[in-house]
Amino acid sequence: MIYTVFLASNTTELSSIRTVIVPRGASFKTVLDSLESSGVLRVRWTLSVAGRLLGRTKTLKVGKYLFPRGLSNLAILSDLAEGKSRILINVPIPEGWRMERIALQCGKYLGTDTQRFITLCDNGAFRKELGIDAPSIEGYLMPDTYKFLWQVSEEEVIERMVGEFRRFYNDTLQRRQAELGRSLPEVLTLASIVEGEAVLDIERPIIAGVYLNRLKMRMRLEADPTVQYALPEGKRRLTYADLRIDSPYNTYLYYGLPPGPINNPGRKSILAALYPEKHSYLYFVADGTGGHIFSRNFSEHQKAVRSYRKLRREAAKNASSPG
């Protein structure tokens, strides 16, 4: 009986290919149900008895597990208490996402609380703990592919992403920021606009240079991504009415940089904001292939805009043609 309850093999050949979830606040019964329904457990009652006799029904580490086959009940209980067989989950966070979308992504992949993630990002005391002197964490969540345990705390996820930003933004970049005479929020705000505009990496420093030229000449930035940030529904094709929205983020109405970052820029856009290309361009428009046509004056720009609109009309015409 002792051998059967404690030492006999009790995980099946399916244990190494089927994950078992132990969520936050799960009871021992819930874990037994999950082990049984997944086909990982051979005999439920022996594990139940072993857990109660050993007082191991409350020492359960939250996570997604892939148990080795042939584990005894003693080994299963030890694993649940220590979390040894928990798997790390890859969470891709692309460049240019807003914190709300990052929160949804973490909820999807990790089972974290989306609303609590957003609330923490907006919490002044939490930002202070992270050393962020800004109205929001927007801009400081470094895009990357991360590895986390299932249902890790929302604090740990945010701390990790901000920590990754801190590691990237090293002494060299901080010195460069000082040379430019800009604050960190200003650098990240410009980088976020570049992130919102650029598709081709080679163009990021050029785009940063355009906006810096416009700032120097006291021209409005007129950056579409800043208006999209002000829209309740988020990013979409803008209308002329959108350009009149009264928001401090509307750079068609207000001079200077917007109040803060409009997304979380990647490394290349941050570097572009710190090392912009020096040129005399003041305008740019899409070229229809993912890049942009850059212009030094309004007349050149209008010509480029007409060219782009012609390409769009031709593309729409071809798309609607039968065959």
Image (cartoon, rainbow, N blue to C red):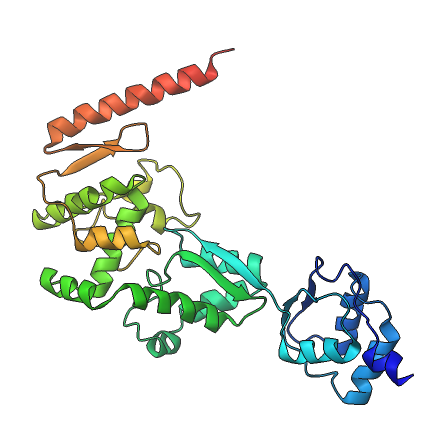
Vertical order, 26 against 16 (above or below): below
- Residue at 76%, 80% (x, y): give it: 74
Spot occupied by residue 322 in the image (x, y as percentages of width and height): 51, 11
Vertical order, 60 against 11 (above or below): below
- Residue at 36%, 60% (x, y): give it: 142
Quadrant housing residue 71 = bottom right
- Residue at 68%, 76% (x, y): give it: 79
Quadrant housing residue 108 = bottom right
Is 241 left, or right, of 119 in this rendering? Answer: left
Is 54 left, or right, of 215 in this rendering? Answer: right
Front position in the image: 82 or 272 = 82
Most extreme residue toward the right, as rendered? 1
**Residue 258 visible from this viewpoint:** no
Vertical order, 31 against 180 (above or below): below
Spot occupied by residue 96 in the image (x, y as percentages of width and height): 36, 51
- Residue at 14%, 45% (x, y): give it: 277
Quadrant housing residue 161 = bottom left
**Residue 127 visible from this viewpoint:** yes
